[in-house]
């Protein structure tokens, strides 16, 4: 069982290393995604974020899911500088993550659209996150209200993408 798990981890590592969309050079030419997702590595946050990404993919959005690679921050910075909307999946773990803070802080400074999504039930935004979301109303996506809240997320994404096309 342990060997099987080690083999799966190695295969995943090789896949992410060989992923052509992970090269910085390719991202510098054009970001191959419609949306970028920023979330903490907490298991519950990851599960909810992947659920959101999966549903968005089914709606034909190209969604960048963070990969724990050496270029993670650089790729998010390139995407933010090119104004690709960032879905910030907020939680208590997100709030204390230096990577998450750096990514959304860069997005804010780049005037990149940030869509705040609360993925932790009963989480209240506080501290530096209040400054980042700047009076935006976050979308609360929990398992209990997922389908209804997801529709609000789609509307927000549609509005941001179409306002970008008009400019």
Image: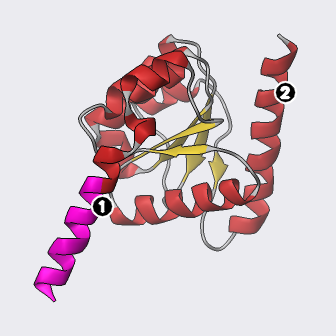
Residue 12 badge: 1
Look at mark 2 in the image and give the residue it sits on: 162
Q: Position of residue 32 (x, y in %)?
A: 58, 32
Q: Identify the main secondary structure in magenta.
A: helix
Identify the residue at horizontal 64%, vertical 44% (top origin).
Answer: 62
Q: Is residue 31 left or right of residue 135?
A: left
Segment tinted magenta in the rendering: 1-14
Residue 135 badge: none
Q: Position of residue 81 (x, y in %)?
A: 52, 14
Q: Position of residue 126 (x, y in %)?
A: 44, 37
Q: Is residue 101 left or right of residue 154?
A: left
User: Does the rendering let one see residue 105?
Assistant: no
Q: Quadrant of the N terminus?
A: bottom left
Of circles 1 and 2, which is in front?
1
Q: Position of residue 155 (x, y in %)?
A: 82, 44
- Front residue of 66/148: it is 66
Identify the residue at horizontal 59%, vertical 23% (top origin).
Answer: 134
Q: Quadrant of the C terminus?
A: top right
User: Does the rendering let one see residue 149?
Assistant: yes
Q: Is residue 154 above or below residue 78?
A: below
Q: Is residue 135 above or below residue 52?
A: above
Q: Secondary structure at mark 1?
A: helix
As drawn, the residue found furthest toward the left would be 3
The picture quadrant where one finds residue 138 is top right
- The disc, 1 or 2, on the residue closer to the chain's N-terminal end is 1
Residues at marks 1 and 2, CA–CA distance in whole angstroms: 35 Å
Residue 167 colored in magenta in the image: no
Identify the residue at horizontal 77%, vertical 39% (top origin).
Answer: 156
């Amino acid at each position: 069982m342990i060997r099987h798990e080690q083999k799966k981890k190695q295969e995943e590592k090789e896949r992410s290393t060989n992923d052509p969309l992970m090269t910085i050079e390719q991202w510098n030419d054009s970001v191959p995604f419609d949306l970028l997702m920023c979330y903490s590595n907490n298991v519950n946050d990851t599960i909810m974020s992947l659920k959101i990404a999966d549903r968005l993919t089914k709606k034909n959005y190209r969604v960048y899911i963070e990969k724990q690679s050496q270029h993670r921050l650089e790729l998010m910075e390139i995407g933010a500088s090119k104004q690709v909307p960032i879905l910030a999946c907020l939680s208590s773990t997100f709030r204390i993550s230096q990577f998450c803070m750096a990514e959304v802080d860069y997005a804010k400074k780049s005037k990149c659209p940030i869509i705040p999504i609360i993925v932790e039930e009963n989480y209240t935004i506080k501290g530096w996150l209040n400054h980042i979301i700047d009076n935006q109303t976050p979308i609360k996506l929990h398992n209990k209200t997922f389908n209804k809240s997801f529709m609000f997320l789609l509307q927000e994404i549609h509005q941001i993408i179409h306002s970008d096309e008009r400019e």
